[in-house]
Amino acid sequence: MQLRIRPNTSAVLSDATLQANLKPALEKSLLSRDRAVAEVSNWEELRQHAHDVKAHTLSRLDHYLQELERKVMAQGGKVVWADTGAEALEFIVGLLQEREIKKVAKSKTMLGEEIHLNEELERAQFDPVETDLGEYIIQLSRETPFHIVTPALHKSKEEVVELFGRELDMPPTDDVEAITATARAVLRRHFLTAGAGITGVNFGVAETGTLAVVENEGNVRLCASLPEVHIAIMGIEKVIPRARDLAVFLKLLSRSATGQKSTSYVNFINGPRREGEWDGPREFYLVLVDNGRSRILADPELRQTLACIRCGACLNVCPVYQRIGGHAYGSTYQGPIGAILTPQLTSAEAAPEHPFASSLCGACYETCPVKIEIPHILLKLRERVQRSRQRLARHLPLEAWAMQFWAWAMSSPNRYGFLGNLMRRVQPYFVRKGRMRVPMPPFSGWDRYRDLPPLPEKSFREQFRALNKEGK
Amino acid sequence: MSRPRILQKVRSACRVKPPAPLPSGYPGAPRFQDPVDVFRRELEAVGGVFLDARNRNPAETLSQVLEQTGHTEVFWEEEKIFTKHGLPYRLRLPESFSTPNLVFSYHYQGRVRLPITLAARSIELDRLAAIPVSASSAAFGIAETGTIVQTVGPGRGRLLNVLPETHIVFLAQGDLLSNMDQLLQRIRPGEEGSALTLVTGPSRTADIGKVLVKGMHGPRRWFVILTEDGG
Ligand code: SF4
């Protein structure tokens, strides 16, 4: 299956409500992020530290994964290795069947989305309940997350009221507190009757076997405390060496993601309940999932993609995401990180448009708390797509020919000047008021959302020459 | 299973580049002259309530909170509340702490009720979830972010701190640190118990229309009572 972006964009671009609400919502996040970051005098030092720690860990990932495994097992946890999403699902389904568990309380996990955990659990007749409010809204409306941090960002209050009215018999209201209280009550019942809790992991500390999970609602805390079985799923790239590094990563993550100095809850989980502790899960499983990550690791330049801490800041700041939103990407991960991660988790052929869904403005790199060179990676991936296209070049002679012509024209100042001159003379016959007069394939459509400005009367070089003369 | 296969793949992938060095030091974090002041400011900024009981009887402050919230009962399970924070000993029922039990009291009148045992879990869980107010003793506080550190241990669980709508934390002044780095130098996660939680203010969500609402799954009202050391 091929993931496309372009066919999805015209609907989003002409959705007036979305266009009116999306950018202001993202700008609100950005504003609090900027404020929270400005307060930290050594932000750049923190970024560099995090970047270096990730680069080191990835370069010795086998070592740290084994250390993490040892420490988790020493605390009474079990560690399961899954090469693919399917293997992870098989284990989880098998365990739930064995324990005769039906209901599963889930907290937000992007890895869970990536491996389609909910669909699989439902297909196998289990009852997974998303307990993060945003994810719960997404689950009830049978959609996919719009944003990796705020999955229901695109839903208006009215839509939620309508949805809860239909699904939960909530009486109509426009009081957000009342809507939230309804969700609290419904989800509390689910919590009290769930047999297992499934959570993601933000950081796995090799040194201490600690799994750190951040959240604001308290639902991760409940998922990891109430049910008898706790399953944490974690991408293999999420390991960090030392506990003290957590102070750096948590500061970067919470401030970048939501502009909070700390999320309301940071859960440090060290295995199942111990002797003498009266609550907490009796069984704890850590599922380490590869699902294409070791392949990304094997590319010296693209490896840094795995340093991502999923803060979502690059989405908020991206001019493309600000216009097309999350669903247009058609993939689990959206925005700049989605643009680089998706083709790598799948293949250049499977997501050929993702690396092109960027203006290469570099805002994502500036914002990224772990300094991932997203624009650079995008270019590398474009190259890959191009190469795979060239293999199909026989099907695209026009593009190949156009490129050759372009190279020919650009490689000589005289040719460039002559052709530029020619363009300035003929353009007025084709363009008026920023639009083409008659649609001319393959260029038509291009100007639907963009202006086609008239070329200036004189070229830069002509103007420069004239200026020079005046100067003398 | 897949363990050897994944490790093999990871190992050979690592080798495409020489190992990068691990930074030996750690970036600095702010240290405060007056951490109490910073803590109060940050806690209030996230919607928590700060109460200074350093120069008074913490039991009185607790009464105030109960009055303010319209409750008469508070539930706790830590003996530390008495020993560390100086709550009157008559509110304590000694034998209840010898087994992992939950204690609650009409502390206002100084009467102690019988403990609820948590042995019959399925029934007790519902009762537990219906408790309106609970109190706990913080292991540490972090001024930079207005954060409380909650640990678990024998007879000291995680649920009582998160299920009720109102939670009251006792924090001893000597346990207030400036930043998280200091915390992680002091403690090793996992050493004391199987869970440690950093809590910063009430439970919250902004998932509907970006409007901030308190009390999504955890406490809606969050009080921190600062006590003197060894009270
Ligand atoms: S790539 Fe960087 S900015 Fe984007 S989500 Fe990952 S860590 Fe955040």
Image (spheres, coloured by chain):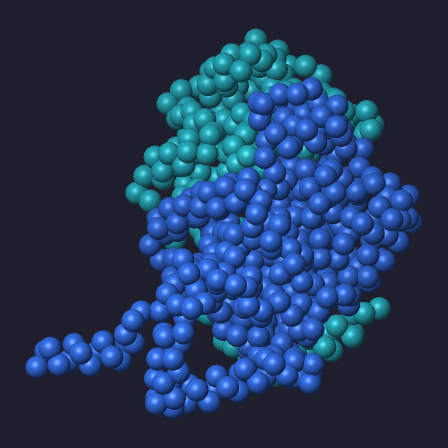
Q: Where is residue A245 in the image (x, y as percent from the top left)?
A: 51, 59
- Depth order, front residue of A361/A128: A361
Residue shown at 64% from the left, 83% from the top: A397
- Depth order, front residue of B136/A201: A201
Q: In this view, does A424 lie to the left or right of B212?
A: left
Image hue for chain A: blue
Quarter location, residue A412: bottom left
Q: Where is residue A418 in the image (x, y as percent from the top left)?
A: 36, 85
Q: Is residue B59 left or right of residue A92?
A: left
Residue shown at 71% from the left, 45% from the top: A143
Q: Residue furthest top?
A: B109
Question: Does residue A85 appear in the picture of this structure?
Answer: yes
Q: In this view, does B12 lie to the left or right of A460?
A: right
**Number of numbered discs on residues:** 0
Question: Does residue B136 appear in the picture of this structure?
Answer: no
Relative to A291, is A301 above or below? below
Residue shown at 64% from the left, 33% from the top: A159
- The quadrant of the picture occupied by the C terminus of chain B is top left
Q: Position of residue A362 (x, y in %)?
A: 44, 65
- The quadrant of the picture occupied by the N terminus of chain B is bottom right
Relative to A274, is A348 above or below? below
Q: Residue furthest front?
A: A429
- Depth order, front residue of A413/B43: A413
- Depth order, front residue of B141/A313: A313
Q: Position of residue A459 (x, y in %)?
A: 29, 76
Image hue for chain B: cyan
Residue shown at 66% from the left, 73% from the top: A348
